Image (cartoon, rainbow, N blue to C red):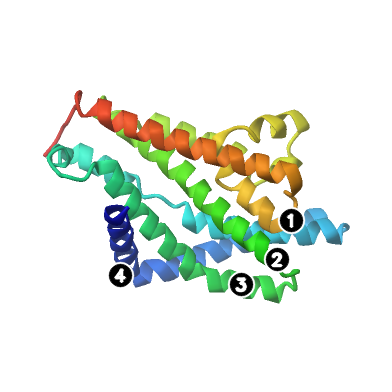
Amino acid sequence: MGVFAAFVAQGFRQQAAYKVEGWMGIASGLIWFVLFAGLWTALLRDDPVALERQMRYVVATRLLADLSLLPTWEIAEKFRMGDVGLELIKPVPLPVRIMGDFLGRSLFRALRTLPVYVLIWLALGLAAPGAADVLLFLGSALLGWAISASFQVSLTLIALWTTQFNEAENLWELLSSLFSGEFIPLYYLPAWIGALAAYLPFAGTFFVPSAILAGTLTGPELWRAIGLQVLWALAGCGILAGMWHAGQRKLTMQGG
């Protein structure tokens, strides 16, 4: 854990160095927030209770969007240039270093934008969440990050077998846009689709933590959802470790 924490700190410091990129990221997030807030205000203006709930949900998803931005293209570049061959002789496995580095960067981005969304929350006059809800949201958000990061890095490791793996990443992004709840909460989808999506890993990345902060996921359903997050996070990390172990034995490189 000490080694992993060192890579987290390294990623945090690295992300802090890109100040211009940071301001651009905040501006981009605010544009997305305005778009979503305007859309849901138009749709729910006749239902103030649902509108406030949805505004809390949108604030949560925009914060999670910064947390879940993963630069997997950097791994792809290692494979394309042939640098991945050097990773095989390093004492710390590539997935451990990548996950630690990505987590550090994600935490910095989320902490950087957190004050902005706190101000938005106050400006909108939204009800303050309870301490328990905030703690559950934070824990669920980290589980969601683990799900997203482990599966996306696993997809990138397909490059250990073949140089063409973009379609796998594109498929993940497509399914995530449909079933993660980033754009539409699962309870606004047709009932059978929402019920199916709730059991997929995508729901744990955006919907579960956002619904916790919005106050729409409570009681037994809340604990079932968090339990599924834990299972999918463990499954994703297991798949990632397995792919790295197997992929070291069959590696295709080009370039360099």
In this orientation, does residue 44 appear? yes
Q: Which residue is mark 4?
A: 17
The one nearer the camera, 225 or 64, is: 225
CA distance separating discs 4 and 3: 24 Å
Q: Which residue is mark 2?
A: 129
- Name the amino acid type tagged 1: Gly
Q: Is residue 83 left or right of residue 65?
A: left
* Residue 233 screen position, x and y as percent: 48, 40
Position of the C terminus, as image quadrant, is top left
In this orientation, does residue 177 appear? no
Going from N to C along the chain, the mark reached first, 2 or 1, is 2
For the point 62% across and 56% down, which residue is it? 136
Q: Nearer the viewer, mark 4 or mark 2?
A: 2
Q: Which residue is mark 3?
A: 118
Contact (CB < 8 A) between labels 3 and 1? no
Q: Is residue 118 left or right of residue 189?
A: left
For the point 50% across and 68% down, which residue is it? 113
* Residue 59 screen position, x and y as percent: 63, 61
Contact (CB < 8 A) between labels 2 and 1? yes
Going from N to C along the chain, the mark reached first, 4 or 1, is 4
Q: Is residue 191 left or right of residue 71?
A: right
Q: Is residue 16 left or right of residue 32?
A: left
CA distance separating discs 2 and 1: 8 Å
* Residue 245 screen position, x and y as percent: 26, 30
Q: Which residue is mark 1?
A: 215
Q: Could you say which quadrant of the image residue 101 lies in?
A: bottom left
Going from N to C along the chain, the mark reached first, 4 or 3, is 4
Going from N to C along the chain, the mark reached first, 4 or 2, is 4
